[in-house]
Amino acid sequence: MNTTAILSAVAVLGGLGVLFGLVLTFADKAFAVPVDERYARVREVVAGANCGACGYAGCDAYAAAVVTGEASITACTPGGQKTFDALAEIMGENAVAVAPEVAKLLCQGEDGVVKSRYDYQGTPSCHEATQLAGGPTACAWGCVGYGDCVKACQFDAMKIENGIVFIDENKCTACQLCVPECPRSLIKMLPRAAKVTVRCLNAANAKDAMAACSKACIACKRCEKACEYDAIHVIGNCAVIDPEKCTLCGECVKVCPTKCITQQA
Amino acid sequence: MMEFTLVNFLLFMVNCVLSNNFIFSRYLGCCPFLGVSSKVETAAGMGVAVTFVMGLASLMTYIVYYYVLVPLGLQYLDTISFILVIAALVQFVEMFLKKSVPALYRALGIYLPLITTNCAVLGVTLLNISDQYNMLWSVLNGVFGALGFLLAIVLMAGARERLESSNIPKAFKGFPISLVIAGLMSVAFLGFTGLVH
């Protein structure tokens, strides 16, 4: 066996490797680019879910944009107020109080509550189901319950229960990824403090609404009359609450004949 | 070995850029050719980076081959040591760009490290050896070969930019039509074969 040949080959390749390594080490020092020291700290306080709620490609991209002052410090909704405060401190900006929001499904059309128009047996997807002859639910505004939004949720905050979406508000981070998924735009971002909600978007007249779903808003305007604060109005055959005026007194909930207005504890 | 005269120089240039184009006749460096050719600006940046790396790699590998490997009789180590040289060189170029041309660095993104494994770069260094060029012709071969690559990738990017706004059947949108165009361009470049002997 020719030991010299093997050794010289090892020595040459090893030597070249060491030489290039040294050159690169030197170059690394010579061409060092100063990195904004705030970047690492910003990266640490953002939620780290890489969910894209901020509108950037991920937490890294968002952190870089925050450091350059390009991105708002309140864009990381999953991080919530804690992240806003920490970012304000790092960036030397004034802390901003943002009313925490939560995603709410504006529908109560569970199985048995809303009538079915046909038995849908296609792909379990809300988009597909709603394309087929106007959707399987008798209410053209209601939740079809195939969970396109559930698939978009990265925080395990949504599930399908009794044929409609249930949102766990303790887990919801207000990232809004589910909002564009709903083909019927049933998910709305509402302030967490707004505990009284009209859970219906049905804009049909009373007769058709009642025929379709027992918990539909029938635009009877009793809530309007009951409200002392001018906070609830029937707009386009469906009641809408102005969260800014609502005092959570619950009078509208009591008078609603179809129980489409709910009040959470 | 060719003598270095103006005529030889020009013939060599035409030969490298058109007749023996790296993309269209040697089929080397196709990955960045398809990957970074969606915008003319980035394509040109990539082409310039490849030109820089191919020129330097030709020089460095020439030195390594004729002053280290040949005296020790270790010619069979050419491929692996060239890979080493190219990898170190690309790292160096990356650092250099990060410091000096950050805009280009951001534009090239992940494609810059890809030059490391770009077969056009390794290809030109090995062709320099097998064609027995001297140091000057090696470097020129690297630079002109890369200019051919630059020409190809910029032409491709130009065509793809136009395609963005044209009405293409859905099945062909994006990558498929790019491959069709690459094939057509390759056929067109076939016309340059035999232009220079």
Image: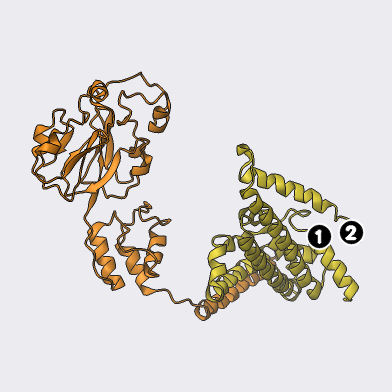
How was this image coloured?
by chain
Is B107 left, or right, of B155 in this rendering?
Answer: left
Quarter placement of the C terminus of chain A: top left
Chain B drawing hue:
yellow
Residue A75 is situated, as x and y percent measured from the top left of the image, at 32, 58
Q: Decide: is B29 above or below A165.
A: below
Q: Tell if the residue under mark 2 belongs to the same chain as the one under mark 1.
A: yes
Amino acid type of the residue that numbered disc 1 sits on in the rendered structure: Leu
Q: Is residue A152 visible?
A: yes
Rendered position, B42 above or below B98: above
Residue at image position (37%, 64%) is A71
The residue at 58%/60% (across/down) is B111
- Distance (Cα) linking label 2 and label 1: 9 Å
Q: Position of residue A4 (x, y in %)?
A: 68, 69
**Protein chain holding label 2:** B
> Residue at coordinates 76% horizontally, 64% vertically from top-left?
B145
Instruction: Please tell me which residue lies in front, A22 or A31.
Output: A31
Chain A pictured colour: orange
- The answer to the question of whether label 2 and label 1 lie on touching residues, with beta carbons closer than 8 A, is yes
Q: Which mark is residue B1?
A: none
- Of mark 2 and mark 1, the one earlier in the sequence is 1
Under tag 2, what secondary structure? loop
Which residue occupies the foreground of this view, B31 or A145?
A: A145
Residue A19's x, y, as percent? 60, 76
Left or right: residue A64 versus residue B117 is left
Q: Residues within 10 Å of mark 1 (few under 14, many from 20)?
A: many
